[in-house]
Image (cartoon, rainbow, N blue to C red):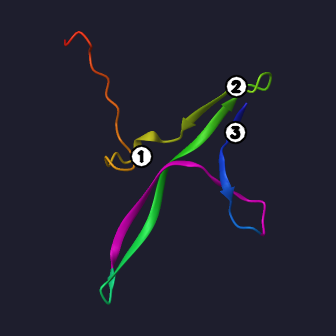
Amino acid sequence: MRARVADRTENMTTDASVPMRVAHYRKSVGSVLGVALTRTESAGELEAGVCAACGYTEFYAKNPSEIIVDGINVRELVATDPAGG
């Protein structure tokens, strides 16, 4: 079975949920009277594959190419050849 992974409810008055995402970024959109204006963006909405019999769960990121590797919030892990080749 596939399922959307909910992070939290949208607000306290509804049952609507917000999808969990892998990364969240703060982006500058300018300034007004010397005060920096920012907005938050996110990427990597999660889906889960769940075994209905035993409950084993695997997470998958939708559209992983949209996740920005910035070295702070997201770091890329690169395997190296232990033989040095």
Label 3 belongs to which residue? 3
Residue 57 falls in which quadrant of the image?
A: top right
Q: In this view, does 39 lie above or below 75?
A: below
Report helix, strand or loop for mark 1.
loop
Label 2 belongs to which residue? 56
Label 1 belongs to which residue? 67
Dot 2 surroundings within 10 Å: few (below 14), some, or many (20 or more)?
few
Choose the circle earlier in sequence order: 2 or 1.
Answer: 2
Q: Where is residue 21 in the image (x, y as percent from the top left)?
A: 54, 49
Q: Position of residue 56 (x, y in %)?
A: 70, 25
Q: Where is residue 60 in the image (x, y as percent from the top left)?
A: 56, 35
Q: Do the residues labelled 3 and 2 touch (CB within 8 Å)?
A: no
Instruction: Say left or right for 31 vs 7.
Output: left
Choose the circle earlier in sequence order: 3 or 2.
Answer: 3
At label 3, the amino acid type is Ala
- Region rendered in magenta: 13-30
Q: Is residue 43 magenta?
A: no
Report helix, strand or loop for mark 2.
loop
Quadrant in the picture for the C terminus: top left
Q: Where is residue 20 in the image (x, y as percent from the top left)?
A: 59, 49
Q: Which of marks 3 and 2 is in front?
A: 2
At label 1, the amino acid type is Ile
Q: Which of 1 and 13 is in front in this view?
A: 13
Q: How far apart are marks 1 and 3 (CA)?
A: 20 Å
